[in-house]
Structures are given as structure tokens and as C-alpha cells.
Image (cartoon, grey):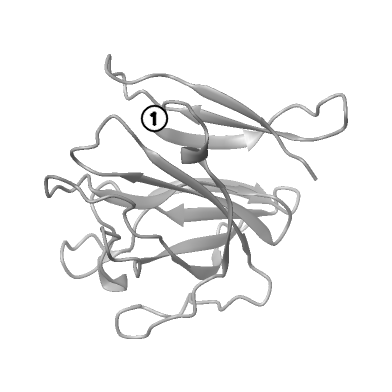
Amino acid sequence: FHFTKGANGPRKNALFEGVTFADNYKTLYASLEEPSYQDGKPASFGFGGAITRILKFDAKTKKNTAQYAYNLGELPIEPTVQSDWNVNGISEILSINNHTLLVMERAWAKGHDDHTYIKLYLVDLNNAENVINNPSFVKNPPKPLKKKLLFDFDTIDRHIDNFEGVTFGPTLPNGNKTLIFCVDNNFSKNQTQQFFLFEVEP
């Protein structure tokens, strides 16, 4: 990745945001929060064609062995002010098994600063196109991963802030797994540190 604004490389504060191990720690996946410049425009209100990348690494050799195109959703609400902080990107990823990832999309829009829009998706990497040799999605449009919406945090009656992480929690007495989500308050008095615990029903 080359840090050349406007031509190639990652956007400001939009490089590796999510990371997870798989295959008994033999594989590491990392996600770019937003598209690199050579891969096209970022998500915006009315534009859901932004495509970023999820990278696969061999944990032992530290080599990047595959990359996958991920289509971000559009900004869910129209900002009242144009800003670099009008964004929808991948905040975190979590491996469910050796080929399935939980992807957390996080969106903000200026003028609606008291709310963060969080959606969870499942993607299956089996038979997915490896775009590691594709230098530009603008010049060579890829075939993005198929997404399945798992959960929209707007469906719960809670204040939703800056979600940054997700991990598996303790197993419940009934045998069901749990997911723990954490919120980063950015050391701000105007934001809330939160933890959410969810039961995963089979």
C-alpha cells in the first residue's frame, strides 16, 4: 500500500481496522475500514458501491496469501454537513470458522453525531474471488463477497455509540455461545463506554 493521497493507498484513518485469527491461529484476517484510493470512492448517502478489501495472511510466514472484495453499504442517513467523518466502513471482523467471517459495519453522519449506525453481516470466503493481483477495483471491477445481514443494532432501544470490537464471550448454561461488543469512548466526556453481551441462538 502506497500512501499517495488521491492516487494510491489508504484514506486517512481508514487502513487496518478489523483483525481476527482463524484455523487455530494459523491464519490471520485483516480488513480495511474503507476503500483505498485506487479501489474507488468511499460509501456515502445514496451510494452503496464502495468496495474495500479483506486480507488473508499466513500467520507463520506473515505473507499475504489472498484478498477479497467487500461491498460496503451506503451511508444510512443524509449528513447535514460534508465532512471526512461521513463514513461507513468495516469496524471489526470475527472468524466464525475457517471460512466464515462476522463483519461489523459502522457508519456516522455529521449532524447526527449522537448516533452510530451498526450492522452485522456474515460472509463466506469459500469459492470467493481472490483479488490479490487486482491493483485497482476502478480499472478492474471485482466480484464482491456475498453478504448476509445478521443484525441491525437500530432494532434495539439503546443508545449506540462508537463500536470498535467484538469477540466470543462465555458459554451460557444452556450451551449457547455469546458475543461481547465493546465501545470506544475516544476519551471523550460526550461519549459512553459500553459493553453489550448477546446470546447466540442456533
Find disc 1 in the rendering and name its residue. Answer: 161
Residue 13: x, y in percent? Answer: 28, 46
Residue 139: x, y in percent? Answer: 30, 85
Left or right, residue 109 beside residue 192: left
> Which residue appears at 28% of the width and 71% of the height?
40
> Which residue appears at 51% of the width and 28% of the height?
182
- Type of amino acid at the residue the image marks with label 1: Asp
Q: Quadrant of residue 146?
A: bottom right
- Which quadrant is home to the C terminus? top right
Q: Is residue 60 visible?
A: no
Left or right, residue 182 beside residue 202: left
Foreground residue among 185 and 155: 155
Name the residue furthest right.
174
Dot 1: what SS?
loop
Name the residue furthest top.
189
Q: Is residue 120 above or below residue 134?
A: above
Q: Is residue 160 visible?
A: yes
Q: Residues within 10 Å of mark 1 (few under 14, many from 20)?
A: many
Residue 44: x, y in percent? Answer: 26, 59
> Which residue appears at 68% of the width and 71% of the height?
126
Name the residue furthest left.
81
Q: Is residue 111 above or below residue 8?
A: above
Left or right, residue 70 beside residue 124: left
- Which quadrant is home to the N terminus? bottom left
> Which residue appears at 36% of the width and 23% of the height?
185
